């Protein structure tokens, strides 16, 4: 099962659902379900709000909602017709955290070793870019690289979560490209400065196209991942190669940072990172999560 965020032709934000190979307006399905339950209406139906309202966001819970609405009044008029303008699956996350050097072969590419505990940095929400959007490279910043990553979306508020309970707070998974201004990052490292600029530039975090509920992914630690630039294969690996696994990452971060519904954690990139330039087409594919496609333009 896959979900996604999109805009109607009038520009209204919506959540969509791929159900039995067809695309449906889940925002309306959810509103109808709530009416059936006599629950109060809420004006804001971004994904985070739905996650909070559902309490146990999961494939199973979504299936139950869809089945009930289908039985009571059918789904035919809730089909999405025509082209879809994808939005980023999670709008307005409270934070985006990214693992650095979480694949040993990638650490080697830059003559680095893997850290002895998860190393994370923040990426700015204003960097988010949807599927099919343009990565816009400002002039004069030197080399910019692609980095395919499995992204975790957090489903509920948690702090100091134990390793063996950490998978319970994962709402779902999506694909991220941690676009990095490598020349600026190298300069920052040499000067002992933070990475906020090199990682935080607008459009430098393509994400999507889908949010796949956690219980629809059999094993998030055995997904093949591939990134191509203009059909040339650049990165090919598996999430099995992560140094710190998802429960360790979440547990470690939550020891220091309160995680909230919709927070995004990018789990690091494998080897094969390389430069992108205006005119390139980037396609990032993770098994079961779809293909995230973006273009590169000059800013
Ligand atoms: Mg990265």
Image (spheres, rainbow, N blue to C red):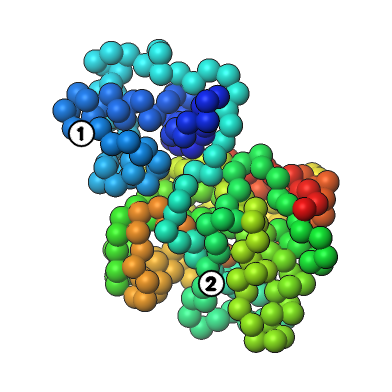
Q: Which residue is mark 2?
A: 121
Mark 2 or mark 1: whose residue is earlier in sequence: 1
Residue 17: x and y in percent read: 44, 30
**Image quarter of residue 127:** bottom right
> Which of the labelled discs sits on residue 40, or is there none?
1
Residue 299: x and y in percent read: 77, 53
Q: Residue furthest bottom?
A: 191
Q: Is residue 79 above or below residue 210?
A: above
Under circle 1, the secondary element is loop
Q: How many marks?
A: 2
Query: What residue is rendered at 64% in x and 82% in y?
Result: 193
Q: Is residue 81 left or right of residue 258?
A: right
Q: Quadrant of the N terminus?
A: top left
Visible residue check, residue 283:
yes
Crowd band around label 2 with a 10 angstrom C-alpha radius: few (<14), some (14–19), many (20+): some
Query: What residue is rendered at 25% in x and 32% in y?
Result: 41
Visible residue check, residue 265:
no
Residue 273: x and y in percent read: 73, 63
Residue 4: x and y in percent read: 48, 37
Query: What residue is rendered at 46% in x and 57% in y?
Result: 264
Foreground pick, 168 / 87: 87
């Amino acid at each position: 099962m896959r979900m996604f965020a999109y805009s109607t032709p009038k520009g209204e934000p919506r959540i969509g659902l791929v159900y039995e190979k067809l695309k449906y307006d889940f925002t309306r399905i959810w509103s109808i379900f709530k009416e059936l339950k006599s629950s109060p209406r809420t004006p804001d139906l971004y994904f985070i709000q739905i996650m909070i309202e559902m309490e146990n966001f999961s494939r199973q819970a979504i299936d139950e909602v869809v089945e009930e609405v289908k039985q009571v009044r059918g789904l035919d008029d809730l089909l999405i017709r025509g082209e879809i303008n994808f939005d980023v699956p999670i709008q307005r996350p409270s934070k985006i955290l990214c693992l650095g050097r979480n694949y040993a072969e990638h650490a080697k590419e830059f003559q680095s070793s893997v850290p002895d505990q998860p190393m994370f940095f923040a990426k700015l929400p204003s960097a988010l870019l949807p599927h099919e959007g343009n990565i816009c490279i400002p002039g004069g910043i030197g080399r910019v690289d692609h980095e395919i990553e499995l992204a975790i979306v957090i489903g509920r508020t948690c702090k100091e979560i134990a390793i063996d309970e950490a998978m319970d707070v994962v709402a779902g998974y999506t694909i991220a490209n941690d676009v990095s201004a490598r020349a600026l990052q190298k300069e920052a490292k040499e000067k002992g400065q933070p990475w906020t600029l090199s990682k935080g530039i607008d459009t430098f975090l393509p994400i999507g196209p889908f949010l796949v509920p956690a219980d629809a992914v059999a094993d998030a630690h055995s997904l093949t991942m591939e990134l191509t630039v203009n059909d040339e294969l650049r990165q090919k690996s598996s999430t099995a190669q992560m140094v710190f696994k998802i429960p360790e990452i979440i547990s470690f971060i939550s020891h220091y940072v309160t995680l909230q519904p919709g927070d995004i954690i990018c789990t690091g990139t494998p080897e094969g990172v390389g430069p992108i330039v205006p005119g390139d087409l980037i396609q990032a594919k993770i098994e079961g999560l779809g293909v995230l496609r973006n273009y590169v333009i000059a800013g």
